[in-house]
Amino acid sequence: MARVRVAVYVTRPSGNGPELLSFAHRDFPDAGIQVPAGGVDPGEDLETAARRECMEETGITAIRDLRALGVDQSPHPATGQDRVTVFFHAVIDQTAPDEWRHIVGGVGTDDGMVFDCRFAPLAEVGPTLVDGQDGFVDQIPAGRGWAPADARDLIERLRSQSDRTKGLPASQGAVLLERSGQVLRDLDRVTVTEIGSHTRASAHPEPSAGAVDLSSGNPDPQLLPDAERLSGEAGPVLALYGEPRVLPRFAEAVSAYAEEEGMPVGGLLPLPGGLFAIEYILSTLLSRGDRVAVESPGHQGDVLLLRSLGLHEVPVSVDRYGMAPEALRAVAGDVQAVLIRPRAQNPLGAAVTPERAEELRAALAGTDALVVLEDHCGPVAGAPFVSPVADDHPAVLTVHSFSKWVAPDLRCSVVTGEPFLVDLLDRRRMLGGGWLSRHTQSLVTAALTSPWAREILQSARLHYAARRSALFDALGAHGIEALAGSGMNVYVGVGDEERAVTGLAEQGWLVSPGRSFGDVRGGIRITVATLPESDAGRLADDIAAVGGRSWSR
């Protein structure tokens, strides 16, 4: 059987046109000039393989705009082994010198080799590439507006390559790509950068002194319940092995809170943090290779987590009311799980309305996919929790996170829902961590039940809403319709994302670029949790000056 491979053209812009990343073997100069390339591991999708090869062979970890250019079928020049190689193009999304030396990592035969890497003009490097790697250089665009190829186009192109018959017949290669787990999926969208690189872009200039950080996503510390007071009310907890792992008063407080918010309870399991809970659910209830529908644009930590678990993300478009019903309907029968944030969605601040919920319930009707609802802003979100899942759906779990509105360092979440599924999670938990600290449970109980703490949460909800509204109105005065439906963020469209983020940094505002969340339209996320209402007008003026525009889908 033919070996499936990837090859990646990584470019960066320059004043003289695009520059291409290439490398040469320090100890084997006869190997010639190459671009990152290699085989796809078992169970690995093509996108992940392309990113891994870049990282292993050059040290580049952050790339964006990953797109497929074509498929080549030709044998290995030395061994004659049949090969099917998918060629990609991507743009570097981190700073890099013109030249550097890299020691290859990984577990393959290249491990420990020393590669001399460099960026040089595409016209200079392209013709020098060996092993047929120059075959699709002419398809690398000079600008940003090129048309990507999707899976079917590539496979049809492979079928039509009748002149490349030295190895596997073209039609057989197409079948291999269609039937393997290494499917060319969704290559016409901007994909996320790798771990640690999907936050503020490293290429942006250092902020000016006294810059206001509106990129962190943090809550306002002044709108959190006082930790010492909570600890005093929680009191000392001396719990030994064998005692109840969930404090009865904690279970009662969480159940009462969930019912107050309109969420079904069922089973209940405390875990250390919201994303941890999502990871725990997916790793326990799904299998490697399963497909998970996620919001797009959305929280890119989800995507990185899925890939680390061997799961495949299926992006579903999002507007101001959450997942688009038709987009969800199109994939609902082909995924094993769906991950939804019904309010304070990141980055758009989307909040599901009753009308949208009915449409989403219809889209999920007749499926048995596991639906995970994550609620991280809770009572301070500024919008009610509206479940997009029918009451009789067979598998629904809700993750309640307390980090944004009790304390980020508390590391506490609760999973509620179908008792049988919660019990499975609990049994799995007992094999490892066992239980969540009962002292932590006591702190959360105090935050949920103490009258003074509830007053602070009510105040936080009103303050966050006022700060969203202040910026929303100030932008509206410039004719810019922002998204500010719920949560702690406001989302604004921009014509040139890099110019907007850089320009605002120069004016003393740090914001998050939309590409960090998979937004292909261009936008910026602004965390307004600590933004004084009096500063909204000045920020709106600066946003308008860097090309702010209404974001719509």
Image: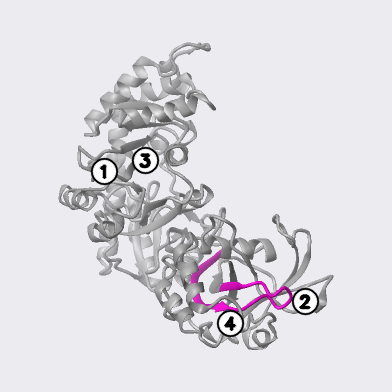
Residue 211 pos. (x, y %): 50, 56
Name the amino acid type tagged 4: Pro
**Span of residues in magenta:** 62-85
Name the amino acid type tagged 1: Gly
**Secondary-structure class at tag 3:** loop
Between 235 and 238, which is closer to the camera in this rendering? 238
Q: CA distance from mark 4 to mark 1?
A: 46 Å
Residue mark closest to the camera, 1 vs 3: 3
Circle 4: is it few (<14), some (14-19), or many (20+) Cα within 10 Å? Answer: many
User: Residue beneath label 2, please?
Assistant: 31
Circle 3: is it few (<14), some (14-19), or many (20+) Cα within 10 Å? Answer: many
Residues under numbered marks 4 and 1 in contact, where contact means CB atoms less than 8 Å apart? no
Residue mark closest to the camera, 4 vs 1: 4
Q: Which residue is located at x 42 percent, y 73 percent?
A: 496
Residue 395 pos. (x, y %): 30, 38
User: Residue beneath label 3, please?
Assistant: 376
Judged left or right of residue 501, residue 121 is: right
Residue 315 pos. (x, y %): 37, 59
Instruction: Name which of mark 2 and mark 4 comes first in the sequence.
Output: 4
Residues under numbered marks 2 and 1 in contact, where contact means CB atoms less than 8 Å apart? no
Q: CA distance from mark 2 to mark 4?
A: 25 Å
